[in-house]
Amino acid sequence: MIDESDLAEVWVRLSRSHDSSFTTAAFVLAALLISIAVIKVYEQLQCYESAHKALAAQNISRAPSGNPFAADAPWKREDLHRVGQNDCEKLGGIFYFRILWFNCVQISDPWLLHEVLAVAGRRPDLIDKPRGFPLPVYDCFDRGTSYPPQPCLISAKSADPWHKVVRRGVSPAFSPENIRNSFDAILEIAERLGDRLLEHGPDQGIDIDGALQCESFDVIGRIGFNHDFRATEDLSGPGAANCRTIKEGCAIGVNDMRNPVRPLLRSVPFLPEAWTHRRKVARVQRQLLGMLHSLAREVCSRGARDLAQDASIGNHLMHLHRQARAPLPFTRMWSELSIFFMAGMETTAHAITWALYLISQHPEVESRILEELDGAGLLMSAQRPSPRKLARDDVACPQQLPYLKAALKEAQRMYSVAPLVVRKALQDVRIRQYTIPRGTAMILHLFAMHNTSANFERHAEFLPERWLEADAETARPIPGTSSTGKAADQKVKRFLPFLSGSRSCIGMSLAQLNYTTAVASLLSRFSFRLAEDMGGPTGVRAKEVYFVTIQPKEKLNMHVQSRGPAPQQEELHEASKGEPLTPQLWGRSLSL
Ligand code: HEM
């Protein structure tokens, strides 16, 4: 007979044996997973190691990496663009460096750079934009453009099925002819900004970079989406606050991009610093996504209109959204709409800021520009208080205002606001005489290409005249570069502020028209002088930062003096009673 106590003992034994076999199975599984992970990491490290050896074997110079954990590690430095430029001057148009085990090749030789872009265009399976670990460079855009985060034109891989559809779909909105038709609206916005500067008066410095962000924000809203945010109507009003939200949203993305540990830290629940940071980020993201969501809704509510009547970006997106066979999902459309503000607002504004700054620092250039504007009847003066209005042809026609346009190109060379772009070798890939090993990051350093002695004579000088020469944009075959001197090599460009190829800047014609219109309109009405609190050119240089774009850290204060007769008090706009655009209003986003 088996009694109850025997049964209990059997049960305990059975459950124990079950426990131990379960524990053993779990242990074996964990050990297996850990071994697989260790093998994978080892394989990856081996991969990086053999890539490193392959680069060294091709006599590609290596730049010192510094301590990647140090606060001043080269890749964390605010003047990262200048670090790359200096290394390029010392090591040439191609060299590599390592961040821990990871290999990055920096390319600024025009022929190599051209070849990388050509291969990436033909074979995105060989070279493409990097996404995810260990190079989450472009992913950061996704979080600021829609919710749930979606890729968009700038962040998507070329192989992303929507990328080609959207790029092709919205390209007609950016055709030079279509953009030229928007000239009147752009001029109106530039003049509106001029009116605010006039109200502000010359005595107090104004953050001209912040003011210009309002201008380019209004231009993108109006030309791209038929929406007037009116940021330039009141530089401390609700429109300017919206513009500020875009800037802060970009700052979150850029901070995460420059330090990928940040998003991880934000997710740790009990870190007090992470908590405040998370709250700040959440607040900005809510505002940003809310604002862009309501714009996307507004565009949708208008429906898909005739493209001949409405050639805006928004209407082109609506057509994709409504397409019968493969409609663009709303979240993706929202993300695509947002990226035009993120990619276009700060770039254009900083480009105009640097141009006004450089011109103000070179009186001989400024007086030639003024002569040209005067000769064209565009310059305001005490004798000519109402000059001729800037016309579309003054801006769009290369024969008109040639010196001003040369000065603008020279400013773009010296301050290439989008200084570097990143690509990744997805396989071993041949770039002229070099093989770039699989997994290697390629930094295409446009700023270094534009600012080193191998590509430009007297590269450190602001010389607009260089652009008046024939073929000024074409690279010169100089010894030490990778030019073979063959006929095909003669066509390669040494000036690519908007990149070239299949992933070049889609907004180039809008940016160029706005850049020229704003500078011509503002210079014909005002003179700009650097404010004393900027510490002269040395102070400006010390506070210049790489934050995906090259920008003045926090502010660039200038005194803006009207060229015409002093305005009467009653002529000033009501809005001038509001708070002027001060550095306090604009200077915080970098610390987010
Ligand atoms: C001076 C002003 C500008 C400069 C210097 C500039 C420069 C660039 C550069 C270098 C790229 C390539 C980025 C990369 O591959 O990492 C790019 C891409 C892009 N830009 Fe611009 N940009 C400017 C203005 C604009 C404007 C006004 C817009 C739109 C309103 C815009 C929209 C875009 C978009 C959507 C892309 C991604 C295109 C793609 O990958 O297919 N940009 N820009």
Image (spheres, rainbow, N blue to C red):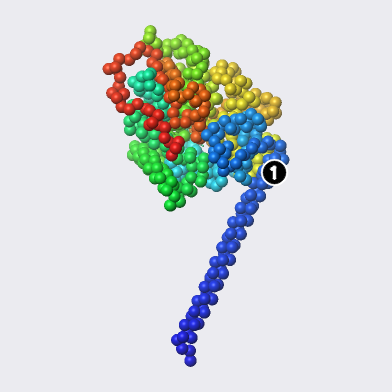
* Residue pictured at 68% horizontal, 36% vertical: 61
- Name the residue furthest bottom: 1
Q: Which of 88 and 226 is in front in this view?
A: 88
Going by the numbered disc 1, the residue's amino acid type is Lys
Q: Position of residue 345 (x, y in %)?
A: 44, 31
Instruction: From this view, report whether residue 238 is shown above or below residue 140.
Output: above
Residue 476 is situated, as x and y percent measured from the top left of the image, at 65, 23
Count residues near mark 1 (Cα–Cα under 10 Å), then give few for <14, some for 14-19, many for 20+. Answer: few
Q: Quadrant of the C terminus?
A: top left
Q: Note whether residue 191 is visible.
A: no
Horizontal side of residue 247 vs 431, given as left or right: left
Residue at 27% across, 17% down: 570
* Residue shown at the point (38%, 31%) measured from the top left: 584
Residue 536, horizontal then vertical, whole percent: 49, 22
Write down the residue under mark 1. Answer: 53
For the view shown, which residue lies furthest in the top direction? Answer: 383
Confirm whether residue 395 shows in the render: yes
- Specify whether 83 is left or right of 56: left
Instruction: In this rendered view, identify the residue nearer to me: 521 or 235.
Output: 235
Lateral position of residue 503 relative to residue 218, left or right? right
State the residue in front, 399 or 435: 435
Residue sitting at x 59%, y 33%? 84
Q: What element carries label 1?
A: helix
**Does any atom of ligand 1 lie closer than 8 Å to the CB of label 1?**
no
